[in-house]
Amino acid sequence: MIKLSTGQDSTLGNYHKLCIAFFGKNSAQTGFIEEKMAKSSNGENEEVVAEEGQMLHLLGSLPSALK
């Protein structure tokens, strides 16, 4: 399992927690991760294989008012 710089596993669930903490519960970033969890057969336990820097860039570039 890939690890984040925080030491946590690189899963949709952990990215979800990070999105809530940094962008807010109703943010586009949190909604994006929630959509990915809903579509994944593993839900929040789905491993994110993209590099952490790429994920942060993607999440940071989402418009703040999508959701």
Image (cartoon, rainbow, N blue to C red):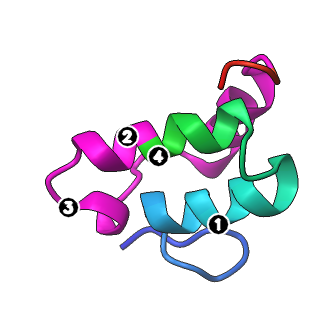
Identified by mark 4, the residue type is Glu
Q: Residue at x 72, y 21 (%)?
A: 62
Place residue 7 in its image quadrant: bottom right
Q: Residue at x 36, y 64 (%)?
A: 44
Q: Secondary structure at mark 2?
A: helix
Q: Residues within 10 Å of mark 3 (few under 14, many from 20)?
A: few
Q: CA distance from mark 3 to mark 1?
A: 16 Å
Identified by mark 2, the residue type is Lys
Contact, CB < 8 Å: mark 1 with mark 2? no
Q: Secondary structure at mark 4?
A: helix
Residue 21 is inside the magenta segment: no
Q: Earlier in the sequence, mark 2 or mark 3?
A: 2
Contact, CB < 8 Å: mark 3 with mark 1? no
Stretch of the chain drawn in magenta: 35-63
Q: As drawn, is 67 to the left or to the right of 21?
A: left
Q: Which residue is mark 4?
A: 34
Q: Magenta stretch mostly in which secondary structure?
A: helix
Q: Which residue is mark 3?
A: 42
**Quadrant of the image containing the N terminus:** bottom left
Identified by mark 3, the residue type is Asn
Q: Which residue is mark 2?
A: 36
Contact, CB < 8 Å: mark 1 with mark 4? no
Extreme residue toward the left, this view: 41
**Quadrant of the image containing the C terminus:** top right
12 w.r.t. 39: above or below: below
Q: CA distance from mark 1 to mark 2?
A: 14 Å
Q: Residue at x 35, y 50 (%)?
A: 37
35 w.r.t. 62: above or below: below
Q: Secondary structure at mark 3?
A: loop
Q: Which residue is mark 1?
A: 17
Place residue 26 in its image quadrant: top right
